Image: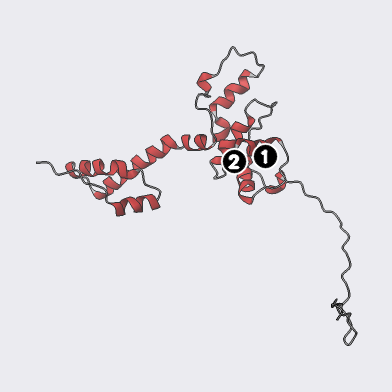
Amino acid sequence: MSAPTPSVTSELRTLLRRLRLGPMADTLPERVVLARQSHMPHVDFLELVLTDEFARRERTSAGVPAKAAHLDPTMVLEAWDDTAEVTYDKAIWGELATLRFVEDAHNALILGPTGVGKTFLATPLLAERGVSLSAAQTYRLVAGQPERLSLMTLAALCDIFNCTPGDLIATSATTTQQTPKAKPARPGARQPRRARITKDR
């Protein structure tokens, strides 16, 4: 008679969620059964469940920022139309498609007119670093000159471009004329009293 499949208690589910391991609860019972049947040592069992979690995160690592950036899932390299009437350097396009510049930690500056996809490239890069911006906000950040910029967004941009804040923000010093402050009254000097308006009797 086979032993019943163990269940994950609510307390364990809470702990897994607090450790950001919530999805592990879905496969944990069958992994426990496998460990019992094969008399698996505790260390091997731990390695097994952690390998499952690592594989799951590898599968979803690209999907999470893409979903946050509202990217079109049909826009993939495999769907590129080579017969489209656009002019581009095919050698550079092939090099970018290899993503070697990411592995080598090199910057890639993508320029082009409105509508070619610059914003959609920048949005997932920011999302991977914890900065979620709408398409309009990202467009103003990429194509314009933002009036305000949070420190978190600035840190993400510095990480993306491997630069310092001074490389992104131009500062200049200006001299402003300060209004002279009123001098304090001398001790014992008479101070004006506020007038009161009373009704005639």
Q: Position of residue 164 (x, y in %)?
A: 67, 47
Q: Position of residue 131 (x, y in %)?
A: 57, 44
Where residue 190 sits, quadrant-wise, is bottom right
* Label 2 close to label 1 by CB (< 8 Å): yes
Q: Is residue 94 above or below residue 161?
A: above
Could you say which is closer to the camera, residue 18 or residue 192?
A: 192
Q: Is residue 91 above or below residue 196?
A: above
**Amino acid type, residue under disc 2 in the picture:** Leu
Please give the name of the residue rendered at 69% of the width and 29% of the height, measured from the top-left corner: 111
Q: Position of residue 193 (x, y in %)?
A: 87, 80
The answer to whether one can see residue 104 in this image is: no
Please give the name of the residue rendered at 84% of the width and 77% of the height, measured from the top-left corner: 199
Crowd around label 1: few <14 · some 14–19 · many ≥20 (10 Å): some
Where residue 161 sits, quadrant-wise, is top right
Please give the name of the residue rendered at 64% of the width and 51% of the height, measured from the top-left corner: 151
Q: Position of residue 61 (x, y in %)?
A: 46, 37
Residue at the far top in the pictured view: 83
Q: Quarter of the image containing the C terminus?
A: bottom right
Q: Earlier in the sequence, mark 2 or mark 1?
A: 2
Classify residue 120 as left or right of residue 31: right
Marks counted in the figure total 2
Classify residue 96 as left or right of residue 37: right
Task: Find numbered disc 1 in the image and state the secondary structure of the residue it sits on.
Answer: helix
According to the image, label 1 marks what residue? Answer: 141
According to the image, label 2 marks what residue? Answer: 133
**Amino acid type, residue under disc 1 in the picture:** Leu
Where residue 63 is drawn, which disc sits there? none
Could you say which is closer to the camera, residue 74 or residue 80?
A: 74
Could you say which is closer to the camera, residue 121 or residue 43?
A: 121
